[in-house]
Amino acid sequence: MLLRKTLKPGDLGYVIYLHGMLYAREYALDHTFEGDVVQRMGEFMKSFDGEKDLFAIAEDAEGNIVGSIAINGHADNTAQLRWFLLHPSARGAGLGKQLLQEAIDFCKERKFKSVFLWTISELTTAAHLYREAGFELTWENTREFWGGMRTEQRYDLILK
């Protein structure tokens, strides 16, 4: 697997596609989820600053995108972990841990005091990785969004 931190034309569109397609298939999220990804990723990229932001892409040996992770640095010295995703073909080989560690290391190098993320309770494998990396569940709320009743969750990691 190759992990790159520079974007090529088409990367964002493909990562958005993977989010929409995989989360619809695996978690029954509807088109409004993909719309939210488009909007939020667009806002993130318009203000992207390589000093405080990261967008990493994982590729397989053939150059296919099989994963992504991003860090959005905030003015209050916190960072948000976003768009952490692995294609099914890349799961189970440690790539998720590698991507997550890359993001955490980026935050430590930038001396952020903490990292937080938003997720939904259905993403149990990702939640396991978050907890294993030291994140703690700090908030949750069940409501209707993205085509069904979902439990939104926030995880936080205090950096040393």
Image: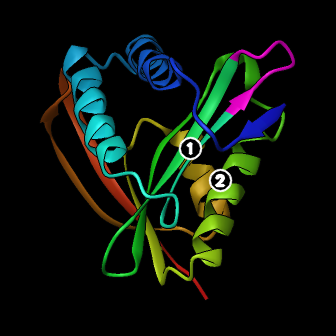
Q: Residue 40 appears at what percent x and percent y?
A: 27, 39
Please identify the residue farthest to the bottom as the structure is shown. 160
Instruction: Tell me if 86 is positioned left or right of 84 in this view.
Output: right
Q: Quadrant of the N terminus?
A: top right
Q: Are marks 2 and 1 in contact (CB under 8 Å)?
A: yes
Q: Amino acid at mark 1?
A: Ile
Within 10 Å of disc 2 (Cα), the crowding (few <14, some 14-19, many 20+) is many
Q: Nearer the viewer, mark 2 or mark 1?
A: 1
Q: Which residue is at 76% across, 49% downward? A: 98
Q: Considering the numbered disc 1 on the image, is that residue within a helix, a strand or a loop?
A: strand
Which residue position is annotated with label 2?
100
For the point 22% across and 23% down, which residue is it? 35
In the picture, measured across the screen, residue 42 lies left or right of residue 103, that is: left
The reply, left or right, for residue 58 in relation to residue 48 is: right
- Between the C-alphas of marks 2 and 1, the distance is 7 Å
N-terminal label among 2 and 1: 1
* 56 w.r.t. 129: above or below: above
Q: State which region is magenta.
A: 58-64
Quadrant of the snapshot with the C terminus = bottom right
Residue at mark 1: 69
